Structure formats: C-alpha cells, structure tokens
Amino acid sequence: MTSDEKGELWMPGKDWRAELIAAVQPENYRYDEPMSRHTSFRIGGPADLMIEVETPDELARTVEYCRKSGIFWFLLGRGTNLLVKDEGIRGVVLKLGREFSRISVEGKKIRVGAAVSLAKVAEQAARNGLAGLEFASGIPGSVGGAVFMNAGAYGREMQDVVSAVHLYRPGKGFSIYRREKLGFSYRSSRLQTEEAICLEVVLELAAGEEAQIRQEMGELNSRRREKQPMEYPSAGSVFKRPPGDFAGRLIEEAGLKGKQVGQAQVAPKHAGFIINLGGAAAQDVLDLMALVREEVHRKSGVWLEPEIRVLGDD
Ligand SMILES: Cc1cc2nc3c(=O)[nH]c(=O)nc-3n(C[C@H](O)[C@H](O)[C@H](O)COP(=O)(O)OP(=O)(O)OC[C@H]3O[C@@H](n4cnc5c(N)ncnc54)[C@H](O)[C@@H]3O)c2cc1C
C-alpha cells in the first residue's frame, strides 16, 4: 500500500494515535520515531507512530484498525532493503516483537519466527548439522523479510529452503501457505502482491556435517567482506539483476563507480551498491538512482529496476 492509497476516512486532525496505542504497553510504541534508527542505510524521516506488536492477535487488531480507518501501515523487518524518504511516514510502522522470535528444530525442519535474523537461524542450522542455509548467513535481514523478498545469494534463494509459511492476510485472517502457493520468483513472492504478513516459517534442510557447513558459511562471508562495502551504511544491491547480466557490471561500464550526489555514492568497491558516506539524505540516494538509471540506459539500452523498496511521503 502506498500513502497515496489512504482511504477516505483518513483524518489527520483526529488523534488516531491515542486510540491505536490504548492497549499497547508503553515500552512498545513511539511517536515520531526517526526511521534512520531502523534502516541499514541510516536514512529516513520520522514515522508518526511505531508499534512493536507482541502477538499475532495484537498484529491483526492493529492492522484491521488501520485498514478500517484508512491509516497507512507498513510492516518493518530489519530495515536492510529499504529507503525511507526524508519526510518520513504518515501512518504506522509495525515491527514484530517477542512471540515472533522463536526457533525450534524438529528433525530436518526448523520452525522460525519471522522476526529472527537470517544469521541467527543459519547459526542454529549449523549447530544442528543441517545444511542448505549457508548462502543466507551473511544476508542481514529477518526471516520474514527474506521470504517476502525471496532473498538469495551465491545461486541459492529462500524458495530452495522454505517449506511453509504462516501468514496474516489483512482483511482475510490467518493462513498457512505451502511453498507451491508462495509464487516465488527472482526477488519476489506472492506476499508482495497480497500484502501478506509472514509470522512464522518452516524451513526444510538437509542432513550435513557441522564443520563443513561452518566452513562454507565462513568462505561465503569472507567473499562478501572482500567484495561488498560493508564498512558503510547501505541497503545492499540497489537494482535487480537484469536478465543475463549484472547491474553492478552495467553501472561500472557506464563509468559511474564512485559517482556521488550529496553524501550518497556509487560504492567504489561494488558498483551495485549505493553507500551513505555520512548524513546522506534520502533525496541524495533517489537523485543518484535516477542518474544511474538514465546513464546506464543511455550506454547499454537497459532500464535497471530497483530492488530496494522506497517508502514514505514527499
Ligand atoms: C550489506 C547488505 C547486503 C545484502 N545482501 C543481500 C543478498 O546477498 N541477497 C539478498 O537477497 N538481499 C541482500 N540484502 C538486502 C536485504 O538484506 C534483503 O532483501 C532482506 O531479505 C530484507 O529483509 P529485512 O528484514 O531487512 O526487510 P526490510 O528491509 O525491513 O523490508 C523489506 C520488505 O520486506 C517486507 N517485510 C519485512 N518483514 C516482513 C514480514 N515478516 N512479512 C511480510 N513482509 C515483510 C517489508 O514490508 C518490506 O516491503 C543486503 C542488504 C545489505 C544492507
């Protein structure tokens, strides 16, 4: 949902925030929360209200209140694939809390809450001699965000390991979708078209040797440190891979490595990344993205499509 889709009942004058937080513990909400504190880019203006929901029922109640009142809402994971605009978000940002942070291992399956980090679940898989998640151990997002994005690296994606997902579908209630129903494709899943919220995931892994799994995780993570500008805030690859090519290669070929707008820069270490040199505005990143798209199109005829999700008011 975009902020342009706010319903007719949207009434900025009304104190909808007080109504929404009436049943929320004081430590679980904040007014005017800067999103720069919650994104790996360290960029983003304030959200009117941020609530950490503790249970599926609290999540459902909050989302349905927003839907019925025409209040914009957004589910935040670990904020590693997001650019929030400088004016922030007129509406509610929801974050999954305690009940969404559990992990349990049942044979070759791991049942994991959507708020758990990929690094943590990959570590748990390794400790239990379960192979298949090595590719994900260095992706900095949450399990829920990774399913939503069908995150992937080194030739593997979430769709290779997800067996089923417990979802909340706004207006429709709770459901379980098996892998076949999740509509996975490159950096996409059915969650994106249905606005479905991932609550819990069942991963199906293979039996392996802990030492070998740890060795592979270590090798992939050193490759990441070598190639990616991890010393700067970013949101990972800004653009999707165009068919048969790499966005970074096309950007480099267009002579844009190191190109800077304000404090946003095409990373000298990896042209697929835009980094925040310190105090970059969202507008700097948006202007740099527009410049990169134009220039790459001019040089190679390809229009790059953003992988990162842009959110917020102008
Ligand atoms: C240094 C760096 C390296 C990266 N490397 C990779 C990589 O190798 N491969 C890759 O694929 N990505 C990579 N990324 C991008 C990012 O980590 C992934 O896209 C990740 O899956 C996003 O998860 P998140 O929890 O941070 O989601 P967020 O950024 O918080 O949100 C992204 C989208 O997911 C939705 N979402 C989040 N949680 C849920 C949920 N529980 N239910 C429904 N929707 C949800 C949000 O609403 C939003 O639309 C990298 C990012 C960085 C900063």
Image (cartoon, rainbow, N blue to C red):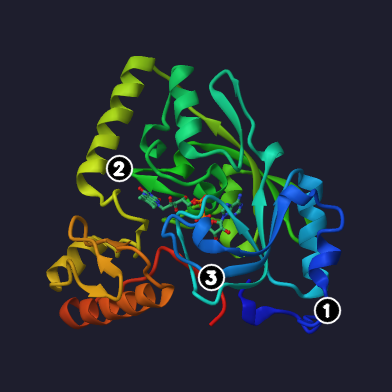
Could you classify mark 1 by the number of other residues whose Cα lies within 10 Å: few (under 14), some (14-19), or many (20 or more)?
A: few
Relative to the observer, which residue lies in front, 202 or 120? Answer: 120
Percent position of residue 106, x then y? 61, 20
The percent coordinates of residue 140 (x first, y second) are: 43, 45
Q: Is 193 placed left or right of 310 in the picture?
A: right
Compare marks 2 and 3 and give the one earlier in the sequence.
3
In what element is the residue under mark 3? loop
Gap between marks 2 and 3 measured at Cα: 34 Å
Which badge, 2 or 1, comes first in the chain's sequence? 1
How far across and how far down the image is residue 22, in percent? 86, 58
Q: Residue at x 51, y 39 (%)?
A: 117
Amino acid type shown at disc 1: Lys
Q: Position of residue 79 (x, y in %)?
A: 50, 55
Q: Secondary structure at mark 1?
A: loop
Residue at the spot 52% in from the left edge and 57% down from the top edge: 37
The CA distance from mark 2 to mark 1 is: 49 Å
State the quadrant of the N terminus. Answer: bottom right
Mark on residue 14?
1
Q: Is mark 2 within 8 Å of ligand 1?
A: no
User: What crowding class fits label 3: few (fewer than 14 Cα within 10 Å), some (14-19), or many (20 or more)?
Assistant: many
- For the image, the number of numbered tags is 3
Q: Residue at x 26, y 61 (%)?
A: 272
User: With 206 as the anchor, is 106 left or right in this view?
Assistant: right
| In the rendered image, the vertical position of residue 40 relative to residue 225, given as above or below | below
- Residue type indicated by callout 3: Gly
> Residue 164's quadrant in the figure?
top right
In the rendering, which numbered label is found on residue 216?
none
Numbered label attached to residue 45: 3
Residue that numbered label 2 is attached to: 154
Q: Is residue 19 visible?
A: yes
Residue 303 seen in the current view: no
> What amino acid is labelled 2 in the image?
Tyr
